[in-house]
Image (tube, coloured by chain):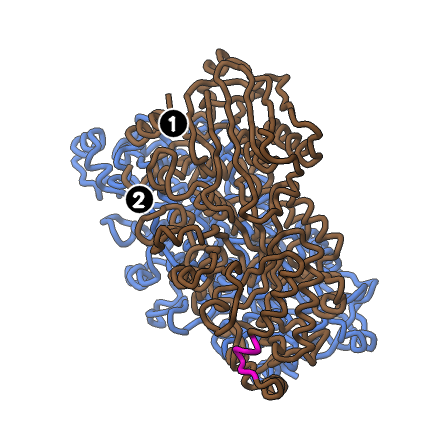
Chain colours: A brown, B blue
């Protein structure tokens, strides 16, 4: 029986079959039966890879551990108790063999994860026979094997001491993501020193890897910069509140082993007020009043972009970061540059006059310097959309633009020929809807309402997200993917997990699976709900505090709580 | 210097004085200076009460512990480092003497906490001299002493190893709440068995006590009922997912020691589908399709209110609960009774015909039976507003109505002469704004948007809450107070703390402090923000994951992130 048949009958009588294929994100193709398969107590994953990199071996060990420790009971009435007879009769699987195709040289997962997006290979093929004969996982790269191990790990449930799958035989051929960039951005700048600990970040990286999110983009990091230790020494809230070199190395390597590329952003030239603690002479409109004239949020303060010392500092910081972060990508920011700030700044006006430049020309000079430094180090710059749309500056065509103001702006950025990362506040901002954080104001949050997972996942429905909306077929290759973002004016470790999960997982499916399910049906929240429940319950079993999507009464009765049930 | 002066100057130059009086909720009156006072290393709280009840002694010990373990640094630039000189010169406080006025017989806090609302006394007076001479706390009741200890505990900050206060001398005279009922309702029915553990509930009770919330109301508890063990044995999701007798006793006594009255609700006759697992013969429209015809949320199912067996079961359950819960109050529910369910139910129609009753008459008979059982046990029934407004039934005039559909309905309930607990979904529902949980629907939540703390606290401002709106002066005594509510379709331990705190604390101030601050200024979010930051940071220090209201940059610079700063 193919998945096609299951899903079609599912639409007719979902609650009767009680059997949602619980993979998240849904592979680009699959063929699944409805036979039970038990995991042998002697089950092992055999790595048939010559000189297997240590992070592949570790990934295999993690996969084995999750299978043993998830202890997820099926989300059906009885939580799997009714499966006992089928389990007793089921064949036993004792081996999964993991191998590479040999089409690429063998590299570590960490090395594969930081290749350029064009060069990365995440494709894998997985076969799990129903008769107990060995399962196989093959891929061109260790990164692809990691993705396949993640899929394999989602097949298993537990009843008492037996671990079992319910939809074998399973065949997935060359599952590969629709979009190479699938990210999550964590703003680590707002709430120090009560901000995210390294362990909060590592837990988030783990959770990302479970749903194949592969970029993490960290904004305005209060981090130690080797060339400029004074920035964090003076600019962080307290001396112990910056991430140290060791913290950063720990995060990068932990992420790399999980197939995640850590991209750093240091926002320039706006949002740089904190530089004034160490270099007051380089910051215009520092903590000026009223802040709303000079910045989108307090405190105001922008690097003096026309001063050679300002340019040197920024270039030097990016140069230093380029040597620390292995990713091919670094974001130089560029959002919310406030022109009032520079117009009112005597030093900037003097600098402009001395060099005979307009503000846009000075911004261009600034960008050539910072981007030049990055290119020299082999990096590709990422910028926020304003750098493409709002200023008369020259950007190299391979620059990547993150569209945040509105998803409507994607078409304009693409029209200018730039590659796009979807990060629009009308879909992907996880912090919206919690009320205004600005004082003396009882309004709702500026990007109301709360962005629901349903709106994200229902591709092509009214008000829902479509990564390729309004683009010609010749333009679609400019869409690299997208990311959810958590700006942390009102977030810290107290609500990190529940505000991010499972919503970020919904975006992960949009950008892995693409517009259509393997059946050809568009992605939709009705089909997705039981699978997302499954993913969420698995997250909880693994220690991530993802919120429930429905009462458990509904979760174990797929479809019963639908509007029209 | 009086607080009046501080606040007036505060409005002029808030960020200069860097000194918000950080009590939450604000007492009804106070007089505070701006002198520093150090806590002596030998500081002790002396209980000058003859035969002090053990829960008073324990409350004193908890207060001492919090003062030592809070380690809260002041929310000012430098986090108190600039206080060092003032602290060094400050007198030392070595004693707080706690005593009763003798106007009431000495009883335990637990006993005082479950008196009727009219008989409860929470008033206290507190004096903390600036010269180091002994501080005093007096009250008519141990419950009042507990409230005063809570206030005393909010005065202290820590710098390195020194604990100190910054606003002495402090005098509070007979601080007493504006409204006797200040509650938090936790729905414990939705997400079992992954629902709230006893320790989640105890932590919530602790947090409630820190801001003087004194009722906890727990809806549709999947609890062991002595007279009907089959209800939880069959009706809970799994056999181990009901709260046991020991759990309940633990919760009741833990709450009582903290001055909190635990009120149980068993919703009848609607929302009783879970009875069908043990008594299918007593439930009409059990899990009927489409559910939306028969209930406001799935699964449908209502107790057969016209059957004598149904009436007997409900009465017996309430009789059993009345002997377990010491509170004077029990809620019999009464929301969302669906008439289609009974109209379509052959058994109910037969019962009605046999007794010659209309549905309203049968509902009245049902209510007389259940409320009669409660009254015989000395309890006062609480009902949802529909019982007063939508059905032709006779309720004793002391019945209390919770208004949930809209705050606009309060006037109608009061007009009928019933006492009211504010619980309106347009202000107090903490679960709103997170998106729809019904499947197959990409709408926002029905009670959008998210209810912000600002909207609650800004009494008399447009769109904000006023407990006495539209009432004549003769009617205001019918307003007992109010409560925030967490319905848990999308909540469980993963997000309990961050979804409740600090918003529930905002409501706590509305109902303790009333419409005006001691200065005569209406309650408003600008004045409240620095104090609520303080309360929130103290919550975090005590292990409750309350969310941040602003970035810390703003929190330590009162007013600097105001809209018009």
Determine whether, in the image, residue B498 is placed left or right of residue B439.
right
Magenta segment: A357-363
Give the chain letter at badge 2.
B
A359 magenta-colored:
yes
For the N terminus of chain B, the image quarter is bottom right
Say which quarter of the image contains residue B84: bottom right
Cα distance, mark 1 to mark 2? Answer: 34 Å
Residue B143: image location, x then y, percent: 60, 57
Determine whether, in the image, residue B420 is placed left or right of residue A85.
left
Mark number displayed over residue A3: 1
Residue B200: image location, x then y, percent: 58, 44
What residue is disc 2 on? B296
Mark number displayed over residue A193: none
Determine whether, in the image, residue B210 is placed left or right of residue A179.
right
A498 magenta-colored:
no
Helix, strand, or loop for circle 1? Answer: helix
Say which quarter of the image contains residue B312: top left
């Amino acid at each position: 029986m193919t998945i096609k048949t299951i899903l079609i009958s599912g639409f007719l009588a979902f609650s009767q079959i009680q059997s949602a294929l619980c993979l998240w994100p849904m592979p680009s193709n699959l063929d699944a039966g409805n036979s039970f398969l038990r995991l042998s107590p002697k089950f092992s994953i055999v790595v048939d890879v010559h000189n297997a990199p240590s992070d592949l071996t570790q990934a295999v060990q993690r996969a084995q551990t999750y299978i043993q420790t998830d202890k997820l009971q099926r989300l059906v009435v009885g939580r799997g108790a009714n499966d006992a007879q089928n389990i007793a009769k089921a064949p036993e699987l004792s081996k999964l063999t993991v191998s590479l195709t040999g089409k690429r040289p063998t590299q570590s997962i960490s090395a594969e994860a930081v290749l350029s997006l064009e060069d990365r290979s995440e494709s894998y093929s997985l076969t799990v026979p129903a008769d107990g004969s060995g399962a196989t996982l093959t891929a061109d790269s260790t990164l692809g094997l990691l993705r396949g191990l993640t899929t394999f790990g989602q097949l298993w449930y537990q009843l008492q001491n037996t671990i079992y799958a319910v939809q074998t035989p399973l065949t997935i051929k060359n599952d590969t993501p629709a979009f190479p960039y699938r990210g999550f951005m964590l703003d680590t700048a707002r709430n120090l020193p009560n901000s995210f600990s390294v362990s909060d970040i590592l837990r988030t990286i783990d959770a990302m890897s479970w749903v194949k999110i592969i970029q993490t983009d960290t904004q305005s990091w209060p981090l130690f910069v080797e060339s400029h230790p004074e920035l964090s020494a003076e600019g962080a809230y307290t001396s112990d509140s910056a991430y140290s070199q060791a913290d950063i190395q720990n995060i990068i390597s932990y992420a790399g082993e999980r197939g995640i590329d850590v991209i750093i952003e240091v926002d320039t030239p706006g949002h740089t007020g904190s530089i004034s603690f160490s270099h007051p002479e380089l910051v215009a409109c520092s903590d000026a009043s009223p802040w709303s004239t000079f910045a989108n949020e307090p405190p105001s303060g922008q690097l003096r972009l026309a001063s050679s010392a300002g340019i040197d500092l920024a270039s030097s910081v990016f140069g230093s970061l380029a040597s620390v972060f292995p990713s091919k990508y670094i974001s130089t920011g560029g959002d919310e540059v406030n022109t009032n700030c520079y117009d009112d700044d005597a030093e900037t006006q003097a600098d402009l006059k001395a060099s005979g430049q307009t503000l846009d020309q000075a911004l261009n000079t600034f960008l050539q310097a910072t981007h030049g430094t990055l290119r020299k180090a082999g990096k590709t710059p990422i910028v926020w959309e304003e750098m493409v749309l709002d200023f008369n500056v020259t950007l190299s065509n391979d620059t990547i633009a993150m569209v945040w103001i509105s998803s409507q702006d994607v078409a304009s950025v693409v029209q200018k020929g730039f590659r796009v990362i979807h990060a629009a506040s009308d879909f992907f901002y996880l912090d919206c809807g919690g009320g205004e954080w600005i004082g003396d104001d009882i309004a709702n949050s500026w990007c109301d309402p709360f962005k629901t997972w349903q709106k994200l996942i229902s591709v092509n429905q009214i008000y829902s997200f479509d990564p390729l909306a309004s683009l010609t077929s010749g333009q679609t290759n400019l869409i690299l993917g997208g990311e959810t973002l958590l700006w942390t004016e009102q977030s810290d470790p107290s609500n990190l997990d529940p505000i991010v999960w499972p919503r970020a997982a919904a975006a992960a499916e949009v950008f892995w699976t693409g517009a259509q399910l393997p059946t050809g049906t568009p992605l939709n929240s009705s089909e997705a709900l039981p699978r997302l429940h499954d993913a969420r319950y698995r997250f909880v079993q693994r220690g991530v505090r993802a919120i429930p999507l429905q009462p458990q009464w509904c979760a174990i009765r797929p479809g019963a709580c639908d509007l029209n049930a």
